[in-house]
Amino acid sequence: MPLMPSAFSRVRGVYPLMLTLAMLPACAGEEGPAAPVARVAVELDRSAVTAGSALQMDYRFTVPERAPSPGDAQVFVHFLSDIGETLFTDDHVPPVAPRAWRGGDVVEYSRTVIVPESAALGPVQVSVGLYEPATGARAPLLGGEDVGLRAYRVGAFELGPQQSATRVVFGDGWHDPEPGDGRPGSAWHWSTREATLTVRALPDGGTLYLDAEQPPAFPAQQVEVRHGGLVVGSVEVTPGRRQVLDIPLAADLAGNGEPGETIDLQLGVVPTVVPADVPALDSPDRRELGLRVFRAAVEPKQQE
């Protein structure tokens, strides 16, 4: 029996198209304001990264006095191979939207991105810029290396193969994966009320990262992570925006202590949603949906 379309805009049709269209303005390179609107600096938490792991990036935008307004701009972040191929992206709206920036402002924030498991290995360049989704217009920036089309190289790292210590396997309680738009990491899984994630044992605890996005019509949801019936981590999910949830996990998730042993984490989501019961979603989907996850990673706590 074929799966019904999911809640997020009839998943296999409209939403992948929306994702593709959303990418186009960030690649168009049309010109916006003539004068620089900010100076950008980005710091990566390490220079050697493995596929499937979580990478933290610290952003700093310094706005010159009398700088022109960037309008309804968003930040585009492209991760490029050494031949210029886009491997994955992390476009986003900063915590203080660019329209609200004023001369003398310093906007600083951190974001975590989970590197897709399928991303091509080797040198990766990170380029950043500002663009208006409605028009594709890009604003000039200071800082970084101008690589053309108002994109600025702000960092680089070497991408190596995935390590078993960071790998997360989707187990029982997940609906079949849905394909996204074909880019690495664009596919997603919907959980049910209870779903299993299998990870390497964590004798010293660690952090579970979930790249998630809920439709705006969903309610706020509580996610609990349990092991052996005990709650070892929890987080509240706000609908309507893509976010990487970082869930600290309690220590002593060691299983039986055997080398290479894996453990099962149970993900509980409250409340769940049946899209067909929510008029705003306009969907015939009768599945019970919990959390929509694009990528997942776990980082063991480092021993001191």
Image (cartoon, rainbow, N blue to C red):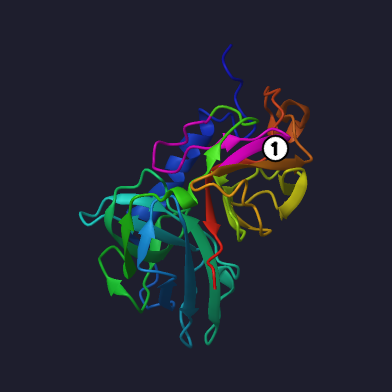
Answer with the quarter of the image where residue 35 lies.
Answer: bottom left
In the image, what residue occupies the spot 56% across and 36% down? 170
In the image: residue 135, left or right of residue 252: left
The magenta stretch spans residue 95 = no
List the residue tagged with mark 1. Answer: 290
Count of numbered circles in the view: 1
In the image: residue 86, left or right of residue 96: left
Answer with the quarter of the image where residue 219 lies.
Answer: top right
Instruction: Indicate whether 201 appears above or below 105.
Output: above
Estimate the x, y position of residue 28 in percent, counting from the top left: 34, 53
Instruction: Indicate whether 140 appears above or below 9.
Output: below
> In this view of the protein, can residue 98 be seen by the observer?
no
Q: Amino acid at mark 1?
A: Gly
Estimate the x, y position of residue 202 in percent, counting from the top left: 58, 54
In the image: residue 98, left or right of residue 43: right
Estimate the x, y position of residue 108 in percent, counting from the top left: 54, 76
Disc 1 packing (10 Å; few <14; some 14–19; many ≥20): many
Q: Main secondary structure of the magenta part?
A: loop
> In this view of the protein, can residue 238 be seen by the observer?
yes
In the image, what residue occupies the spot 71% across and 35% down? 194
Estimate the x, y position of residue 265 in percent, counting from the top left: 65, 43
Q: Circle 1 sits in a helix, a strand or a loop, which is it?
A: loop
Of residues 83 and 139, the one nearer the viewer is 83
In the image, what residue occupies the spot 51% across and 31% down? 178
Of residues 215 and 100, the one nearer the viewer is 215
Residues drawn in magenta: 177-198
Query: Which corner quadrant holds the N terminus?
Result: top right
